[in-house]
Amino acid sequence: MTTPARRSLVDRHTAFVAALREAGLPVSVAEGLDAVRAMRLIDLGERESLRAAYAATLVKRPAHRRTFDTLFDLWFPAALGDGAVPPDRPARRRDPEERRVPPALDPEVQARREELFELLLSGDDAGLRRFARTAVAEYGQTPGQESWFSSGVLRAMSPETLMARLLNAVLTGRERGGMAEQVARRTFRDRISRFEGQVATEVRRRIAEDTGVERTARLAVRPPLERLDFASASRADLAALRREVYPLARRLASRLAQKHRLGHRGRLDFRRTVRASLATGGVPLTTHHRPRRPHKPELVILCDASDSVSAFAHFTLLLTFALREQFTKVRAFAFIDTTDEITKYFAPGTDVVDAMTRMAAEAELVWITGRSNYGHAIKVFDEKYADAVTPRTSLLVLGDARSNYGELSLPLLRRVVGQARHAYWLNPEPRSQWDTGDSAASRYGELLPMYECRNLTQLTEFIEELA
């Protein structure tokens, strides 16, 4: 295997572009070639110029920039091995006995903290990068282990505890608590955050040299927001996803409206076309079409609201109701082990997050156990809401098809699907997990098409196709 130090520029470029694609960034072959052309116009010895050239040609969305920078730092590190540490401040590997001394009692650690204080106070980014490399070399390894960690560096340097001193240094003689303090606090918080990011970058570089760039890239990079699995989203990710829903709905709605305008002509009227061609010697220079019959479908959603798919159900309902103007009527039903209509919670003008909260508190979704029971839920839907599905209806079932080994009510669902104009099933589980354990994905998939839908990109593509 070619070591990172011996990779040619062509090899690095090819691998870097492949890593961007693997991380979910849309990079075409043409854009990769654009990056190569841009490299002919810059000084390849200027690393930040190289970063800017790649970013200008390969990054399409601001949300992708963080992933891009992480991968760029792995594939084009500032230096290799211990050569990354400035020669004027060589790092000294501390032995285990020295590391057992608490940082507050270690004079060498305190000297390093004073140096960090001065760098944060002056805002010297280049100095902070050099300091981060030295600090990782000294404090980035746990005693007795070969792995590299950011935690040891941040615990020793403890940059957050320098905030009070930094504020005192710049606010001497000024009134505290006012605008000046807020600006200073924000400035130092940004500098501390950049330092922590530089430490993380250096740690990743060290790990990549030890274990391989490709492996480190797969572990260090999270997918972009639109490709983030709903089930693995953190609270901050969920908030960001909610912010994405309404712009996404507007973009989809405008695209769908454009499709309707472009499709204003109906089917060819053969008789009128032939009759008109008599005036031009039988050549049909002008075609005539029957009037187009506009069709806006009704939409019925049957949604599993159990804990295992709650995040998926939340964003599917959120986006679907944001697109309600594309449908004549939208009715939604949720279930766990029994079914209740939840359309009333999503009245026009209602905040959808509040609607989801009300639904969880007020809707009657639990029959006995509170665990998913698709068979009983389908039975209740057929008994109470059979009139909801008509020949104008598109039926959308959302769930993982896991019924805890209970009944499935396949004949009832077959009849409901037969009444609908279209029927689809969105499953948030990876296709590789279908039909494992209590999953009945294939048995339900025989009745209506089942699609894997785990992230915002897959959901967007499907909703566009449906509408």
Image (tube, rainbow, N blue to C red):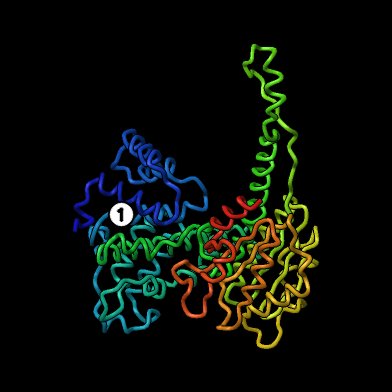
Image location (x, y in percent) of residue 73:
35, 55
User: What residue is shown at x 61% (from left), y 61% (from top)?
Assistant: 424
Percent coordinates x, y for residue 240 in the rendering: 59, 61
Q: Residue at left 33%, top 46%?
A: 47
Name the residue at the bottom extreme. Answer: 368
Quick check: can you spot residue 155?
A: yes
Closest to the observer, 248 or 82? 248
| Left or right of residue 358: residue 244 | left
- Tell me the crowding category of disc 1: few under 14, some 14 to 19, or many 20 or more residues within 10 angstroms, Cα based: some
Residue 358 appearing in the image: no
- Say which residue appears at 77% left-offset and 64% top-offset: 388
What amino acid is found at the position of numbered circle 1 in the picture? Answer: Pro
**SS label for mark 1:** loop
Image quadrant in which the N terminus is located: bottom left
Q: Nearer the viewer, residue 10 or 70?
A: 10
Residue 353 vs residue 270, the one in the foreground: 270
In the image, what residue occupies the spot 30% across and 51% down?
15
Q: According to the image, label 1 marks what residue?
A: 77
**Percent of width and height locating residue 400:** 56, 72
Q: How many numbered circles are shown?
A: 1
Q: Position of residue 364 (x, y in %)?
A: 75, 79
Decide if residue 325 is on the left or right side of residue 438: right
Residue 387: quadrant of the picture: bottom right
The part of the image, by quadrant, that contains residue 358 is bottom right
